[in-house]
Image (cartoon, grey):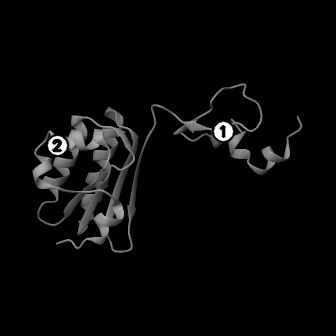
Amino acid sequence: MDRTADEVARPEFTSTEPHNADPLVHEITKHAGPGRIPRPSPQAYRVTTTITDSGAVVVRLTGLSDTNATQEFGAALRAALESRPGLLVADLFGLRSAGKGLADELLSAYHRGRGTTCLRVVARQVPALRALSRTPLWQHVEIYPTLAYAVRTPWI
């Protein structure tokens, strides 16, 4: 099988091998031919944890929030709280949908780290803000429009 120069230069866009598959990406069509561009899967979510230079721990949830995403996000928050960071940021900036379970996980994290950890939430999208506004979390946690602003503002 001959491959075009474009396929050789960008194999991640043409390969459908399982070892190259990203769980957040699916192909537009199986038979689209060379040079296919992947797009996000409609059922995709991703939970990541990072530590900033200032020592803040950021737990990020992007994509669509379902039961599995909420449970994984809650587990990531609990794992982050075990290290007793001064600042824990729950980044919901890339979230496309949210439910009450997500707010419950955030409220649980707030109560677990109340004495030692400052919890902040990054959210600008309507689904995330709507889910948070219907819970007691709205009165307890500071909500920021961007991650940079949430981390830059002094804590404790």
Judge by depth and name the residue closer to the eye, 115 or 138.
Answer: 138
Tell me which residue sits at (62%, 38%) in the image. Answer: 38
Judge by depth and name the residue closer to the eye, 39 or 69.
Answer: 39
| Image quarter in which the N terminus is found | top right
Q: Amino acid at mark 1?
A: Ile
Q: Going from the N terminus, do you reach mark 2 or mark 1 first? A: 1
Tell me which residue sits at (27%, 64%) in the image. Answer: 83
Question: Residue 101, position in %: x, y?
Answer: 23, 37
Badge 1 density bin: few <14, some 14–19, many ≥20, Cα 10 Å: some
The vertical placement of 5 against 50, above or below, is above
Q: Amino acid at mark 2?
A: Ser
The vertical placement of 114 against 65, above or below, is below
Q: Secondary structure at mark 2?
A: helix
Q: Find the residue positioned furthest to the right.
A: 2
Quarter-of-image position of residue 148: bottom left
To which residue does mark 2 refer?
133
Left or right of 48 in this view: 106: left
Mark 2–mark 1 distance (CA, rounded to whole Å): 37 Å
Quarter-of-image position of residue 142: bottom left
To which residue does mark 1 refer?
37
Question: Residue 51, position in %: x, y?
Answer: 38, 66
